[in-house]
């Protein structure tokens, strides 16, 4: 594996599935597992990972995302399955101690991974506070019914990308990039949308289609409840840094809803920008903060500090 901070594409077979990886830095440096968000991929870290000079960053495309293999039809994409994959991946890499950098849904995967693996030195969550898409207590049965109906409808009517493998969805690259940008209300920059889309597109010659598994756009049959999501947050024992966008997903009541579940060793920092502020405009101060937080050892226990 070459040195330097240019990104490199690699792959690894884990838990019977093929995973595509994007890596940056010297493999002898402090290892960092970078976990992207829902419908994103390893390109989520393309602009910040090369600047984390003291770290070896490994960003996998989670199962069904980007260039990684899709799960079998009789399997799903639950957060605990992603976490189990990442635990096995870390073991395959031979890491004894490591840190985690997560964005959005990746923070939910990280919160469960923390329950499986006690060798994590520190965690940095970017615009995420653990498991997203959690359901209220008492709504699990009705949610399952609705999710199952939607899945059957999608398969029957070929909705949500459930079409033939040679059927193009976009006539041009720019059309695909525009849809990716507009999927989160246009808050993603054009350059950020391009980076994510380019890793998630197949050129069919007569057009383009997404690589990711279309099942990802459908709700999970049995997601975590809100109480379970908070329980996984509360059990994190390593230093945790929460980096939230002032125009991101937690700018309002969402932060207050999960705030009580933050472990005592948490620092919360607010940054200008939306949900992908790390991909849109990675300022030097942000890079310095992430780098310092990732280097925070488990022995350096922090007191809770919330910077409003």
Image (cartoon, grey):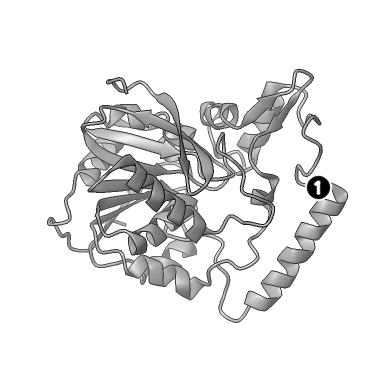
Residue 38: percent from the left, percent from the top?
55, 48
Q: Is residue 282 left or right of residue 54?
A: right
Q: Residues within 10 Å of mark 1 (few under 14, many from 20)?
A: few
Q: Residue at x 30, y 38 (%)?
A: 286
Left or right side of 79 for 33: left
Res 282 → quadrant: top left
For the C terminus, the image quarter is bottom left
> Quick one: which residue is furthest to the top in this view?
205
Residue 202 rendering spot, x and y as whole percentages: 67, 27
Can residue 166 be seen by looking at this rendering?
yes
User: Based on the displayed image, in which of its 4 quarters is residue 109 positioned?
Assistant: bottom left
Q: Which residue is identified by label 1?
A: 159
Secondary structure beneath dot 1 equals: loop
Q: Choose top left, top right, bottom left or bottom right for residue 233.
A: bottom left
Indicate the position of residue 59 as horizontal and vertical percent values: 41, 37
Position of 78 with respect to 121 (left or right) is right
Pick whichever, 296 or 188, lies toward us: 296
In the image, what residue occupies the spot 57% across and 66% down?
Answer: 223
Query: 107 left or right of 152?
Result: left
Residue 271 visible in the shown view: no
**Nearer the observer, 66 or 230:** 66
Residue ID at (63%, 56%): 75
In depth, the one of 14 and 124 nearer the eye is: 14
Residue projecting furthest to the bottom:
138
- Residue found at the very far left of the displayed protein: 299
Which x, y percent locates residue 211?
65, 35
Quarter occupied by the N terminus? top left
Residue depicted at x 56% and y 79%: 137
């Amino acid at each position: 594996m070459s040195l330097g901070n240019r990104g490199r594409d690699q792959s690894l077979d884990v838990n019977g599935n093929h995973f595509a990886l994007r890596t940056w830095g010297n493999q002898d440096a402090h290892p960092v597992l970078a976990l992207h968000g829902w419908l994103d991929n390893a390109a989520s870290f393309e602009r910040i990972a090369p600047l984390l000079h003291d770290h070896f960053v490994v960003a996998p495309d989670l199962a069904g995302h980007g260039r990684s293999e899709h799960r079998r039809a009789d399997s799903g994409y639950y957060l605990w399955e992603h976490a189990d994959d990442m635990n096995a991946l870390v073991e395959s890499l031979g890491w004894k101690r490591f840190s985690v950098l997560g964005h959005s849904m990746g923070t939910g995967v990280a919160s469960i991974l923390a329950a499986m693996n006690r060798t994590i030195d520190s965690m940095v969550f970017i615009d995420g506070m653990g498991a997203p898409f959690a359901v209220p207590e008492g709504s699990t049965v009705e949610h399952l019914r609705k999710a199952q109906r939607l899945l059957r409808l999608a398969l029957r009517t070929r909705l949500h990308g459930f079409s033939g493998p040679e059927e193009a969805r976009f006539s041009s690259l720019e059309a695909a990039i525009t849809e990716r940008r507009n999927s989160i209300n246009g808050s993603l920059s054009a350059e950020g949308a391009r980076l994510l889309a380019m890793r998630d597109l197949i050129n069919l010659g007569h057009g383009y289609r997404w690589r990711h598994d279309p099942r990802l756009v459908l709700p999970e049959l049995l997601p975590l409840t809100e109480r379970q999501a908070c329980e996984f947050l509360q059990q994190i024992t390593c230093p945790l840094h929460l980096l939230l966008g002032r125009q991101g997903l937690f700018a309002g009541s969402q932060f207050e809803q999960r705030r009580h579940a933050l472990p005592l060793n948490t620092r919360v920092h607010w940054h200008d920008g939306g949900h992908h502020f790390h991909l849109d405009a990675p300022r030097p101060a942000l890079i310095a903060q992430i780098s310092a937080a990732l280097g925070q050892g488990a022995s350096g226990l922090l007191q809770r500090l919330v910077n409003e």
